[in-house]
Image (cartoon, rainbow, N blue to C red):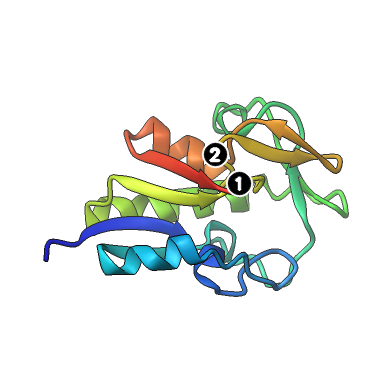
Amino acid sequence: MDFHPILVSACLLGMRTRYDGTDSLRDEVVSLLDSAFLIPVCPEQMADLPTPRPSSEITDGDGRAVLEGKARVVDENGKDVTSSFLKGAREVLDIASDTGAKVAIFKEKSPSCGVLTIKRKGRTVPGSGVTTALLRTNGIVVKGVK
C-alpha cells in the first residue's frame, strides 16, 4: 500500500495540545490512518508555547495579514505572541518539506490552523490561521475540520 504523508492538527488525533489542554478528536480523521501516513503537528507547541496556555487571537485580518506584518497575534492577557506563531508555522512548513507532504488537515477556528474560519472576540469570523496561510503560500493544500 502506498501511504501519502498528510500533516494533521495533533488535537484532531486525540492529542491534548489545544490551548486549554484538551483535544478535538475526530474519528473521521483517525480513520485516515488506514490509507495515509498522518503526521501530527501543533504549531503552537512547536513554537515552545506551553500547554495549557492563554488563548490567542489574530487582531486584524487573518494569517496572511500576520505573514505580511499587517496584523499581530495577541493572547488573552494582551501579550504579543506573533513571533511564536510565526516560528511554529515555519516549523510545520519545514516538516512538510522534509516529508514531502502536499496536504494538511487542520482544526478550524484556530489562530494557527484555521482554514476557513478563526475566532475573534468570541465570534467565528472568516479567515485562515498563520500556519495555514504559510502552507498555502508554499503550495500545500489545507483542508479544515470543525
Of the residues under marks 1 and 2, which one precedes in the sequence? 1
- On the image, numbered disc 1 is attached to which residue? 108
Q: Quadrant of the N terminus?
A: bottom left
Q: Residue furthest left?
A: 1
Determine whether the residue tagged by mark 2 lies in a helix, strand or loop.
loop
- From the top left corner, tell me how far across and down residue 23 is, in percent: 63, 70
Amino acid type at mark 2: Val
Q: Mark 1: which amino acid?
A: Glu
Q: What residue is disc 2 on?
A: 115
Judge left or right: residue 126 versus residue 100.
Answer: right
Residue at horizontal 12 percent and vertical 61 percent from the top? 2
- Percent across and percent down for residue 34 are 28, 68
Instruction: Give 141 or 52, whichever is nearer the viewer.
Output: 141
Q: Residues within 10 Å of mark 1 (few under 14, many from 20)?
A: many
Q: Label 2 crowding class (10 Å Cα cut-off): few <14, some 14-19, many 20+?
A: many
Callout 1: SS: loop
The Cα atoms of the two marked residues, 1 and 2, are separated by: 6 Å
**Residue at position x 45%, y 42% from top?**
143
42 vs 142, nearest the viewer? 142
Quadrant in which residue 52 is drawn? bottom right
- The x, y position of residue 118, in whole percent, is 68, 39
- Percent position of residue 65, x then y: 61, 27
